[in-house]
Amino acid sequence: MCLSKGTGQGHVLKTCKLIVWDEATMSHRNAFHALDKTLQDLRGSSAIMGGATVVLAGDFRQTLSIVTRGTPADQINACLKNSYL
């Protein structure tokens, strides 16, 4: 999916104040990095997540993100806890 400043989806992300991400603990950390860079670009801000408030919901005691043909170390490296965010 391509988001740009001129699209409706880009406008929604640019103007929203709060983003709630449920089951965030099961997502790959690169998904969070992509959201961070996208919001920074759309909002013209170098702050984390473009300055938007992001609520991450989930249980870190549950399943880690799925890494196809990955080792347990690959799953841990894909985890949100190993992200710069």
Image (cartoon, rainbow, N blue to C red):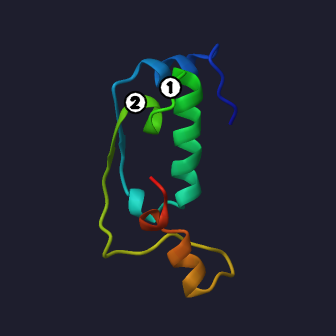
The residue sitting at 48% across, 68% down in the picture is 79
- The extreme front residue here reads 46
Q: Is residue 52 visible?
A: yes
The residue sitting at 58% across, 38% down in the picture is 37
* Residue 56 locus on image (x, y percent): 34, 50
The residue sitting at 30% across, 54% down in the picture is 57
- Relative to 56, residue 79 above or below: below
- The residue wearing badge 2 is 51
| Circle nearer the N terminus (1, 2) | 1
Asked if the residue under mark 2 is in contact with the one under mark 1, i.e. CB atoms within 8 Å, the reply is yes
Q: Between 62 and 17, which is closer to the camera in this rendering?
A: 17
* Residue 19 locus on image (x, y percent): 37, 36
- Relative to 74, residue 16 above or below: above
Question: For mark 1, does the 10 Å Cα neighbourhood hold few (<14), some (14 to 19), or many (20 or more) residues?
Answer: some
User: Residue 4 sits in which quadrant?
Assistant: top right
Numbered tag placed on residue 6 in the rendering: none
Mark 1 residue element = loop
User: Residue 54 sits in which quadrant?
Assistant: top left
* Residue 18 locus on image (x, y percent): 33, 31
Q: Is residue 9 visible?
A: no
Drawn side of residue 36 relative to residue 18, left or right: right
- Relative to 17, residue 73 above or below: below
Question: For mark 2, does the 10 Å Cα neighbourhood hold few (<14), some (14 to 19), or many (20 or more) residues?
Answer: some
Q: Disc 1 to disc 2, how far (Cα)?
A: 7 Å
- The residue wearing badge 1 is 45
The N terminus is located in which quarter?
top right
Q: Between 30 and 44, which is closer to the camera in this rendering?
A: 44
Mark 2 residue element = helix
Give the amino acid type for the residue marked by disc 2 in the picture: Gly
* Residue 73 locus on image (x, y percent): 56, 84
Give the amino acid type for the residue marked by disc 1 in the picture: Ser
